[in-house]
Amino acid sequence: MMQLIEANWPLLVLALAIGLLVAWWVFSASRRTQVLRDETADSGEAARRNHALIDAPPVAAQGEAPPPASDASDLARIKGVGPKLIAQLHELGVTRIAQVAQWDAAEIARIDAQLGRFAGRIERDDWVGQARLLETGDTAGFEDQFGKL
Amino acid sequence: MPIWLELLVLLLVAYAAGIGIGWAIWGRAG
């Protein structure tokens, strides 16, 4: 056995490397859904857009009132939250974005511990940051950080 | 056990070890 290993170690190292390569390909491919943020982006344009939004007449004044922000599918507006997560969150008593927006570190840890295979998603996708922007109606700020709504 | 079969088993073990290490590095945290 040892002789076989000694005689063929380059082949074994190659097999190990191929295994590593396959694992890297499989496991990093499954994590490509990360929310990417460009921290270095100049915020000048965002500020101008926000200012334009502030100056514009309120949407409610233009026509009929928008639907209430807290309906049942509210949580789906958070990027990275799908039907399965929504069902899980409902079981935990979380049904509205307003609740998510008020989470502190302890609450995040408590909920995260009960999310099973979705553990880590709250911080990875920055739910609280998203929820706060959605809650305040800062669409421009949201799209600037997390992409189109 | 023929020698080629022993070698094949060793190669498979090495391959599996590679995947195991890769999982520990890239798979667990996500």
Image (cartoon, helix red, strand yellow):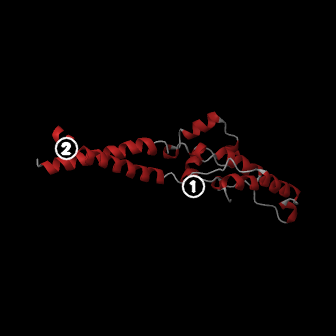
Q: Please state if A120 lies on the left or on the right of B27 as rendered.
A: right
Q: Position of residue A146 (x, y in %)?
A: 66, 53
| Residue A71 relative to residue A123: left or right | right
Q: Which residue is nearer to you in this view: A17 or A72?
A: A17
> Residue extending furthest left?
B1
**The residue under label 1 is which amino acid type?**
Gly
| Number of residues whose C-alpha sits closer than 10 Å to that of mark 1, classed few (under 14), some (14–19) or many (20 or more) | few
Residue A73 vertical placement versus A39 (above, below): below
Residue A131 in picture, x, y percent from top left: 69, 48
Task: Name the kind of residue labelled 2 in the image.
Answer: Ala
* A124 on left or right of B20: right
> What mark, if any, has residue A7 been given in the picture?
2
Chain to which the residue tagged by mark 1 belongs? A
Q: Nearer the viewer, mark 2 or mark 1?
A: 2
Estimate the spatial distance between the alpha carbons at disc 2 and disc 1, rounded to whole Å.
53 Å
Q: Nearer the viewer, residue A79 or B7?
A: B7
Residue A37 percent coordinates (x, y): 65, 50
Q: Residue at x 70, y 40 (%)?
A: A102
Looking at the picture, do discs 2 and 1 lie on one chain? Answer: yes
**In the image, residue A42 lies at what x, y percent?**
74, 50
Query: Residue A9 got which mark?
Result: none
Residue shown at the point (13%, 48%) measured from the top left: B3
Q: Which residue is mark 1?
A: A82
Marked residue nearer the N-terminal end (2 or 1): 2
Q: Are marks 2 and 1 in contact (CB under 8 Å)?
A: no
What is the residue that sits farthest to the bottom in this orientation?
Answer: A63
Mark 2: which secondary structure? helix
